[in-house]
Amino acid sequence: MFNLRKKSLKRFDLVLFITVLLLCAYGILMIRSATLTFDNLRSVKVQAFSTILGIIAIVFLTLLDYEFMGKIYIPIYIVSVLLLVAVALFGTGVEKWGSRSWLAIGGFKFQPAEISKVGLIIFLAKYIDNNKNELNRPLTLFKILFFSGIPILLIAKQPDFGTSIVLVFFLAVMLFVAGLDWKYIGYAFLSAIISLPILWFSLKDYQRNRILNFLDPERDIPNTGYQAMQGRVAIGSGKVFGRGLFKGVYTQFNYIPEKQTDFIFAVIGEELGLIGGLTLIILYFIMLYRLIKIAKDSNDMFGSLMVIGITAMFVAHIWENIGMTIGLMPITGIPLPFLSYGGTFQLVNMVCIGIALSVCIHKDGLNF
């Protein structure tokens, strides 16, 4: 279950670990700026506590042989789905956030959708590994799509369309990397195109407005387009060097809705400018490069696919969040990894890094 050999520990990817710590520190600093005028350090404390728990999780998971997760991949999947079912039955958040995405146990709230992302990645990686020689058989693909579809539909029903899209994205990437036949990729694109009208009419009004506002940014600025416009204006006002930390006009006077979560990049753009934004993107590039290297160097499909799924998940979040903030993507409420405020989100991201580091040091697949 654990591998404590010095030879294995020497493989520990220190560059990845340090990069993630820098991202976490960057995030805590920007959350402090985003909440300076109204939060009294509560968000900073929650984020810092989640980060500390995440570091502990990284240490534990790094020492844990990742093959152990493969042995319990079915229970992991079942627990992930049951948590989402519990959200459907007992979830909260509709009144405040417009979606039933949180479970409350006493005074503690968390988002099962975030946990289910990791659970689905582990399940898919092991299931595909177990059936790698039969991946392109219709029955095998049907089972993969069926088991993936359950959490995707439960999350979409909350509704959390953004997170469900993330699941679809890393599912597609994992299947592609595993060797999915091109004809199935063609069928998938054709099905997506055909289903667009059905998908459009199934969207809620606010979701349609987000897409329409993306296509025409000046369509409804005072109402449904307000958040997107304020984010872009704030970023533009930061220019190259920014207005200065804690000195952003749009940030400190609360003109940017959800600035500590979905629109944290707007805070960076206004207060730290182009330099701050590029610094963040460089840190993300280093992190993603190290993750891809771990996946490439892995000796087995299970470990490699887990890291590929994690990498794809991060790419989806980074691309969508920064894209929606600068006007290149519709707004979906997707947070920015290690930067956006969210205890569950932060902890889950750290767990993903721990899994990747476990794959990195346990390449031999030896259990002790």
Image (cartoon, rainbow, N blue to C red):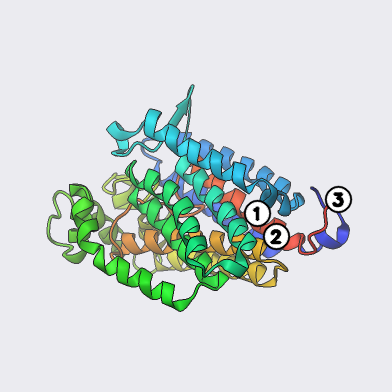
Q: Amino acid at mark 2?
A: Val
Q: Which residue is mark 2?
A: 359
Q: Is residue 53 above or below residue 314?
A: above
Residue 41 visible in image: no
Q: Earlier in the sequence, mark 1 or mark 3?
A: 1
SS at badge 3: loop
> Tags 3 and 2 in contact by the CB under 8 Å rule?
no
Find the distance from the CA under tag 2 to the CA under tag 1.
Answer: 6 Å
Mark 1 burial class by Cα count in 10 Å: few <14, some 14-19, many 20+: many
Please name the residue shown 29% across and 56% down the image: 331
Q: Point out which mark residue 368 bears.
A: 3
Q: Residue at x 53, y 65 (%)?
A: 174
| SS of the residue under disc 2 | helix
Judged by depth in the image, the label closer to the viewer, 1 or 3, is 3
Answer whether labels 2 and 1 touch (C-beta < 8 Å).
Answer: yes
Q: Is residue 168 above or below residue 223?
A: below
Comparing 212 with 286, the one in front is 212
Q: Read off the residue under disc 1.
A: 355
Of circles 3 and 2, which is in front?
A: 3
Q: CA distance from mark 3 to mark 2?
A: 15 Å
SS at badge 1 = helix
Residue found farthest to the bottom: 182
**Image coordinates for residue 283, horizontal then vertical, percent:** 55, 65
Q: Residues within 10 Å of mark 3 (few under 14, many from 20)?
A: few
Q: Looking at the picture, how far across and down is residue 64, in whole percent? A: 75, 49
Q: Nearer the viewer, residue 181 or 274?
A: 181
